[in-house]
Amino acid sequence: MIYLKAVLSLGLMGAVFGLALALAAKKFAIEQDPRQDRIVEVLPGANCGGCGFPGCSGLAAAIVAEKAPVDGCPVGGPAVAAKVAAIMGVEVGAAKERKVARVLCQGSSDNCGSRFVYDGLSDCKAAQLVDGGAKACVYGCLGLGSCVAACSFDALHMGPDGLPVVDEEECTSCGRCVAACPRGIIQLVPAAQSVTVLCRSYARGAEVRKTCKVGCIGCGLCVKVCPTGAVTVENNLAVIDPAKCDACGKCVEKCPTKCIVMKGAKASADALAAS
Amino acid sequence: MRDVLRLGFILFAICAVAAGALAFVNDITEERIAAQAAMKLEQALESVVPGAEEFRDETDRVLALKAAVSDGGRPEFPLINRVYVGYDNGEMVGTAFACTPSGYGGPIDAVVGVSRDGVVTGLTVVKHTETPGLGANITSRDFQMRFVGLRAGIPVKVTKDGGQVEAITGATISSRAVASAVDQALRLFELVTREGVW
Amino acid sequence: MSFRSELTKGLVRENPTFRILLGMCPTMATSLAISNGIGMGIAATFVLVGSNVIVSMLRNVIPSRIRIPCYIVVIASFVTMVDLIMAAFVPKLHEVLGIFIPLIVVNCIILARAEAFASKNGVLYSLADGIGMGLGFTLALTGLSAIRELLGTGTLLAVPDFGFPGFRIFDRSLAAVMVILPPGGFITLGLLIGLLNSLTRRKKKAAQT
Amino acid sequence: MGEILVIFFGGVLLNNFILSRFLGICPFIGVSKQVETATGMGMAVVFVMGVASVVTWMVEHYILMPLGLGYLRTIAFILVIAALVQLVEMVIQKVSPVLYKALGIYLPLITTNCAVLGVAILNITEKYNLLEAAVNGIAGASGFTLAIVLFAAIRERMDLAPIPESLKGFPMALITAGLMSIAFLGFVGFRLKELFGVM
Amino acid sequence: MDGTGLIVSSSPHQRAAVSTPVIMSDVILALMPAALAGVWFFGLRALAMMVVCVAAAVGTEAGLEKLMKKPVTIEDYSAAVAGFLLALVLPPDLPLWMGAIGAAFAMAIAKFIFGGLGQNIFNPALIGRAVLLASWPVFMTRWRWPIFQAPWIPDFDAVSSATPLALWKLNGIKTPYLNLFLGNVAGSIGETSALAILVGAAYLLWRGHISWRIPVSFIGTVAVLTALFGQDPVFHVLAGGLLLGAFFMATDYVTSPVTPKGQIVFGVGCGVLTVFIRLYGGYPEGVCYAILIMNAAAALIDRLTVPRKFGEVKKVA
Amino acid sequence: MATMVAKTFRGGVHAHYHKEDTASKPIRRLPPPARVVIPLHQHTGAPCEPLVKVGDEVKVGQKIGDSSARLTAPVHASVSGKVVGISLHPQSGGRDVLSVIIESDGKETLDEHVEPRTDVDHLSADEIKAVIREAGIVGLGGAAFPTYFKLTPPPGKSFDTVILNGAECEPYLSADHRLMVERPGDIVDGARLLLKATGVNRAYIGIEENKPDAIEAISKAVKGDDRISVVPLKVKYPQGAEKQLIWAILGREVPSGGLPVDVGVVVNNVGTAAAVRDAVFSGMPLVERVVTVAGSCIAEPQNVVVKVGMLVSDLIEACGGYSAPPAKVIIGGPMMGVAQFTTDIPVTKGTSGVLLLSKDEAAPCDAMPCVRCGKCVEACSMRLMPLWIASYAEAGRFDDAERMNALDCIECGCCSFICPSRRRLVQAIRLAKSEIMARRRRAQAK
């Protein structure tokens, strides 16, 4: 008897609530794509905003709404894109080339001086607003480290010479440092690109020579020596087309101000060979 | 709709099984628990009313009387739960009041023993959740002895409130709670005596 | 995934209190003395293991809409069982733990493990997970209790309700009562988690370089 | 009226669920990043705890006690609460997607908010009548709301502070709650009954 | 290559003379009368307490900063101020090591881990005091009479260790105004002499370091409320830690609201809580807890009292 | 008039004024420099196109640059001589601006357009405005907003009051003060022209109380014209900021994001009024202005009348050169002026002062953590919460900075001035404003 009372009363309560919940579930049913939650689970969860949406859940919502591509997460790379694609049931295009951030300036305090003594916030954008920044070269790195502060992957550090250094292994190409730089000195380049022009100055050669020891003077020597026609000079600045460059290193040798450099695997192999 | 019924049924089934299992466990433990509680109560009662060999639960009688004399509003003795009268050879030797005052950490279960002539004969704390090292000292014999010998007719209060009982240092609230329980026990005793119940 | 790794992960790597940060309420409320901590830990472990196993067995039967009520019913059943059994057979210990036993129901660890692990894994692994997590919880609780008991009362391993005064380390009048008051619970646990965080960070850094 | 005020202020200030009873810590720390969401969560808890107090009180007094099924209290109460919370969740999701989004995953956490079960059990052990139980539930929840909103405002400020890396987040939340709890020690021993003339 | 070598910064190029370290050292200066009164009434023991608390506070801050490899900031005097204030709100006979623990806890837990100067939520000195009171209530409620006897107490021995507020609350004995004003009563080291505190407060007000809003609303609320409750407002203003708290603790920049309206709300809140704790609370004195509770509310008050910006369209309700 | 209670606004700071060196000395007219560099963009609005070529001979007052844009102001030659170059030249604030460089012939030949007008009383409002536009007059207080544009209310709005700003609350500067003392009649004539141009018959001239001689002189000059009254103002910075001035004099609050015209008011500097008078009465365009040269590093601090285009380095030379090597060179006042890294920049229409501060005055200081004293909140003349805007800006949380009304900041500098922790509040708020505006532009572009 005592058993029956217990079983029945609690069982009935269970049944009542079960029914109520089930009914409510019907009545208050809401359309939400279950894929969204699954995509959020797959995404890295850093909420870095590199995709251009407010956080990972924002991107997930956009992907589900087909307002963003399945490979919209620059941090996750192809691995995440594949998983997202599986959830969305679409094929990913050719895997995107991995990109890394590169600092296109060598104007350390030794190479490029300053126009005045800056007294203010340690923030590049704020410094840029004060008489256009203290750096002698108006295109050069201000060196206050806003990009370092912006990086949430510990991939950027301030070097001893006052220039930021990218740890290309850690870099996820989220693009936050690019957005943090008031002078567009940091750019995302294909990780495979080994020859880079480390200068952003559009100033004429004579002016560059006045302000910086390692700036591009637009002399065009590199254009002349390049066997594949990958180098051009636009607006007094050498530009390398990564598609044509075969990393032969001739321009690097010829450059009078040493503003074209070899980076990455090739560079270390060469260094090894030289030693 | 079938789906709805299905959900209801599953929850029903799980609840039913759970209830059954619990009823079973309850069945086999109930007696033991009751026996444990009874034993514990017995011990507590004996410790506060020395000399009694038998206790009778006379709560209902006392409460009926209390209802008769009070105006029927809120209970006048909210802290008193049960009243046990101790007898020795059929003669009343004292009364034990089970009280539950609120301490610092929650309710305190205490039993207060009062002799026939209205003197506190013993106090014991059965259960409490006071702060160890401070309020928990209400279980210490030293503290409990401070109440023994107090008489009905004089309000029981801690010294901080102008009374006669020294509170435990740093644990005024717990002490105050116990004092209030003793106070109510004595007042109820006085009322009952005045009405000539025993 | 192996039985063994599921068993040990709860101890340190995924310790429910220090790493996953679950079950804070009972952790702080009961960690006043080592005896409380161990008793609570064992009771919680029992419930955790039982509910993990049952939930894992029922995982394919329970519809997702009502899974939370179902899990809770299962958990509550085990809690009530523990409550009744302890009251009957170890009344002293039952008294020591008092009101904290029914509150095991709402210990987030248990529901979280049911939801996050047992509902997705087989019975064996769920069993291991339950034991591991339970032990981890007990470990954390014991550690925290030890600190609070020592600083707050000056003793270690005291079980007053059994008449055992414990080992007195320093005089009671010098003990900092605040440590066993609510603020002490918050602050001690916060500092302890912070300390473990900084140790892990240091380790990670050391491993990197 | 005095009794009701005593219960209410007792629940909000003296026996604050978070700061002196350790009930409801998980949502307290989880949903306190912004004042707006904290307020929303607080409101949800007030509603749930008020209703839960009434329903569990009725379950106790109309089903369990008459049938002598006291040992089923825990399980019955938690069942009621779980179902109730889920209902509330569904309703909010339908009625106010904004609120739902803000509270996000924390709504289900109200289920495991020990405060709700705690208040239901306290209502019974304190022998409250129906009205007192309802007030106690709302008071406990208001205390929760007070603590969480104050804490959220503090936390917004702490967001900009250079806090040591390993203490960031959870540990800091606990420590701040601890300091708030120290401040609330000021209410210990407060004679509410005297203030409201209930002796 | 520093170009012209000229300094360029964003405007403004002119700054007011008062700096944070100057304010802090002025606070120390303003506390001197109260500290001297404490030494006068309670002897060199009081001085020892001040030295220990200041040393512990400064040492803790410097030590932690060294440990965490952060710049050492003891030269802003804020640690010294906190230690000094803590000593002034402790009983003169508290064991010195307890004072040191209070100061260390205050600096480490209430200030340093919150991010140091300017980031703490609660007044460190008051946290130190509250922690000591919660930890060692016995030691923290043991008072001593100053050099003079207390002739207004009929049965002197029975209550030889009570502050005026406790005497009034528990025994109904009211200490004469003059003794309260001069400070010849039992109490914390720096809180007994209203005269000394007012001298220091006047200096801070004259220097413009504190505004009138918090002290006036705080003390005013206490006076009005106690009068409403049929108490003696003058006694309540002079007794206990109200004046010290209102002028030196509640006005702490970091832990009080920044908006003018918020400061008044803060002061009124402190006043209300103080009176309620004094009249109905478990402690004779409520200033410390009242301020701590309002500290917890300061961030919210700030949020709710953002001034109406100039030119904001007045909304018609 | 003397019994009138000085008016003011809420907030603000009391700064050390440092005006004693220059305020008592009469304005000195400097001889024309050998060479001037006249930027084609000295004003708010579109830059001018050059109207001359290299090699052209120009005369004083000859228009050398203009634009067809709606919001612009033409520029005129300030000396007679030969155009030797039209090229980029640095201007205040580190910008390079296309400038016309003229080698003076020292003859000061006037352009034929410059001749006194005899029919002033018969000019219509539109004719006056046309004269003002052609004369290239802009606000001389510092912002250099084209005056004719200001005087034309946008459709649907109208003026009922003209205010002349003689507050001159910036420390060090005394150019307006001297002008009011020396040419009160011209200023009042200018005020009358502005009344006519806007069709209004109520004008106030607000002057801070610390210039009793100016108040007296102007009061004397307005006697008999009851349309114009002089209003003494309390000495407090930024008393001369447009919105604060309107509030102090009229009790009207310019709505957030709005302009004085929204409350029916047009505010002009007293110097602008004098320039308007000159343009209308003598036909002389704006080619020179009064500049305060001050600071502890200038040998002869004083107010001088300077040709627009004169290089600051030449100006310093003409004032006796440095008395000590300056650490900071500021164009404008110390509160809102712009620090320069070179003196190779021209004086423009908006240059109210040149300050040379010593190392002690300009010493860079380390910012300490904010102690939340709330002094910046009390001092903010726009009643904002500078500490919050700045903290959010420094943390890169610009949305939050916007929510705290960063865009309402007028950059008066009171918060940074008063901050005991020496925080760079204004710079951080500027950063926030520029980022918020950049985001808005990006959002619009999308």
Image: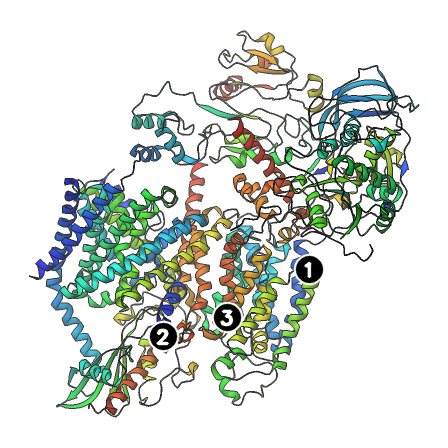
Amino acid type of the residue that numbered disc 1 sits on in the rendered structure: Gly
Q: Is residue D145 above or below residue F140?
A: below
Q: Marks 1/3: CA distance?
A: 28 Å
Q: Is residue F406 visible?
A: yes
Kind of residue at disc 2:
Ser
Report the quarter where the N terminus of chain C lies: top left
* Up/down of F53 relative to B1, above or below: above
Label 1, label 2: how far apart the Cα atoms are: 47 Å
Q: Where is residue B73 in the image (x, y as percent from the top left)?
A: 28, 78
Describe the colour scheme in one phrase.
Answer: rainbow
Viewer-nearest of discs 2 and 3: 3
Numbered tag placed on residue B174 in the rendering: 2
In this view, the mark in front (1 or 2): 1
Q: What residue does disc 3 label?
A: E286
Chain at numbered mark 3: E
The crowd level at tag 2 (other Cα within 10 Å; few <14, some 14-19, many 20+) is many
Label 3 environment density (alpha carbons within 10 Å; few <14, some 14–19, many ≥20): many
Q: Position of residue F132 (x, y in %)?
A: 78, 30
For the residue labelled by badge 1, is the local secondary structure a helix, a strand or a loop?
loop
| On screen, residue E198 above or below B49 | above
Q: What residue type is labelled 3?
A: Gly
SS for dot 3: loop
- Determine the residue positioned at 76% across, 56% down: F5
Find disc 1 in the rendering and name its residue: E208
Disc 1 crowd, CA 10 A, few/some/many (<14, 14-19, 20+): few
Instruction: Pinpoint residue F32: horizontal percent, then vertical percent.
Output: 89, 28
Residue at disc 2, secondary structure: helix
Residue D158 appears left or right of F26: left
Residue A78 falls left or right of residue F148: left
